[in-house]
Amino acid sequence: MTQPAPDSEAGRPDSGPRILISADMEGVTGVTWTDDVVPGTEQWQRFRRLFTGDVNAAVAGLCSGAAAGVLVNEAHLSQRNLLLEDLDTRARLLTGRHKPLSMMEGIDSGVDGAVLLGYHAGSGCEGVLSHTYLPAHITGVWLDDAPASEGRLNATLAAEYGVPVLVVTGDDRACADAAEYAPDAEHVVVKECVSRYAAVCDPPSVTAARIADAAERSMGRAGSGAPAVGAHRIEIEFDAGHLAQAAAVVPTVAETGLRRVAFEAATMTEAMKAFKVVTSIADSAVQGTYG
């Protein structure tokens, strides 16, 4: 007996747009502080359910908009936070670490659109749990001289594969950031930043409806992108000079100041792989109390 293709399983249509959800956690409904997102805490267990709820809302909206398949790429810390047993059966989950394209693994698989879910403002900017890749120790990132959050970096990578960003969800600061790098996307505010560790939050039932409606509307833009391939420059500022020195051992990476390094790459794919190496080395150079 011939087995059905993956996208026709579990009631999925066998043709139509395929969508990637890059699912981060700091920008999801209700999250406001460290314990909400650090694996192993009681709060993390609670917010895994809310995280999965936001993802399910996006899946529901995308499928209402005629998505043929949805791949959810876990993009937060251990990348094992979402509850597979509670995931909408119309989606599939890419979980676990050490993926070549990290937060955007799967963007090169022929998908027609991307959702950046649970995103947050970048390092050096105000927003709930704002950072870029490392929770601390990076004070600024610039892509081609523009301040770069994870959203800007990942949207630029998506553009290299001709994949439009359809939806961005997060706090109001993350959505204001997204208006700059993905102006045509739907921007869904799930909470309003008061400080790095405080926000005015809407209940999950309210944010789920908001996310689903935006995801359904966004499907009109699926498949509308064209590949934008080119060279890029990334500059990173750390909170201590020894982190820049550690990162500068990577070939092509040069110190540009006491706490800064920069590098260029021929494509955004290469730039993001180099960025992952640089941040990993810098993170490993942090030493206890004195950083």
Image: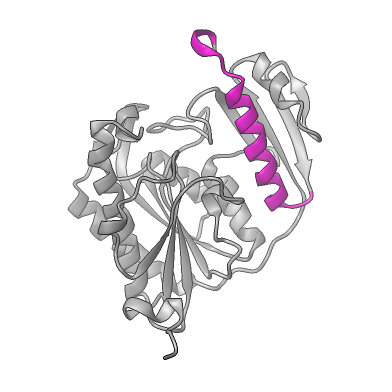
Q: Quadrant of residue 211?
A: bottom left
Q: Is residue 256 magenta?
A: no
Q: Residue at x 60, y 68 (%)?
A: 225
Q: Position of residue 146 (x, y in %)?
A: 64, 39
Q: Is residue 267 magenta?
A: yes
Q: Position of residue 106 (x, y in %)?
A: 55, 60
16 up-or-down from 52: above or below: below
Q: Quadrant of residue 237?
A: top right
Which residue reaches farthest top?
290
Q: How many marks?
A: 0
76 up-or-down from 60: above or below: above
Which residue reaches farthest front?
1
Q: Position of residue 99 (x, y in %)?
A: 56, 50
Q: Residue at x 67, y 15 (%)?
A: 242
Q: Residue at x 72, y 19 (%)?
A: 245
Q: Is residue 52 left or right of residue 254?
A: left
Q: Nearer the viewer, residue 176 or 251?
A: 251
- Which stretch appears magenta? 266-290
Q: Residue at x 31, y 33 (%)?
A: 40
Q: Is residue 33 left or right of residue 257?
A: left
